[in-house]
Image: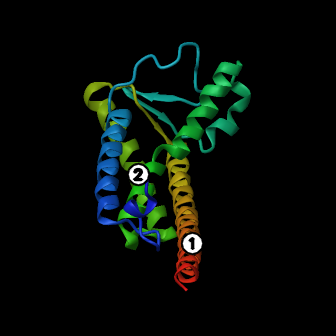
Amino acid sequence: MFQLKTWVDKDGELTPKGRKLSRVLVYTYLLCLVLLCWTPQYGLVEGVETPGIQHFGRVVVLLTPFNSLTNFYQLDSLKEIVFVLGQNVTNIFLLSPLILGLLALYPRFRSWKKVLLATFVMSLTIEVGQVILDLLIDANRVFELDDLWTNTLGGLLALAAYRLLVKLIQTHLKEVKKTWELYASQVSLIFYHTNT
């Protein structure tokens, strides 16, 4: 049976067992990110052309800020609209699981400024890495300016979700404790009255 207190304490901090599991999950997600972001990408969706793309030799970039909104009128089909807007939504949540794990593991990381900076640097590292891959092996990756802000927004949303989750855990564990205290007092009263 799943016991929340096995993984987190009453303050919402990870237990040793929770820390071990979180490290495994963070490393696993980090490996998935590397594979997702830094492997060649060919023929994603046929018939979909993202507007605003520029080619500089093998390097492909999308430098228009808020490209999906700025060039929305150039999207010709529902398929293109769903694909382009879907990319933005998925980019918002790309780094969120990693940031959630880091927030759980490292209390010093839990400030807006640190999350903002770390998520932006991670996103910039991914984008620059994609340019380097294109230069080295023609990986067909795209440096997208919008990915920087969407990934960073996702990091900030992860911080908000983390804070909410900790509050929910604290509230839940307090309620469980109150219930057990009430149950224990009722049981002791029953035993007291049975023995007298």
Query: 2 above or below 112?
Result: above
x and y percent of residue 169 in the render?
Answer: 53, 65
Front one among 84 and 111: 111
Disc 1 marks a residue whose amino acid type is Tyr
Q: Farthest residue in the front direction? A: 196
Taking the view exactly as shown, the residue that stands out farthest to the right is 73
* Picture quadrant of residue 5: bottom left
Percent across and percent down for residue 54 are 50, 30
The residue labelled by disc 1 is 183
Q: Earlier in the sequence, mark 1 or mark 2?
A: 2
Determine which of the numbered discs, if any, sits on residue 98 in the image: 2
User: What distance separates the C-alpha of mark 1 from that of mark 2?
Assistant: 40 Å
Name of the residue lying farthest toward the top: 46
Q: Nearer the viewer, residue 142 or 18?
A: 18
x, y (%) of residue 29? 36, 44
In the image, residue 140 lies at what x, y percent?
A: 39, 25
Q: Residue at x 34, y 25 (%)?
A: 40
| Residue drawn at 70 percent across, 32 percent down | 72
Q: Nearer the viewer, residue 94 or 53?
A: 94
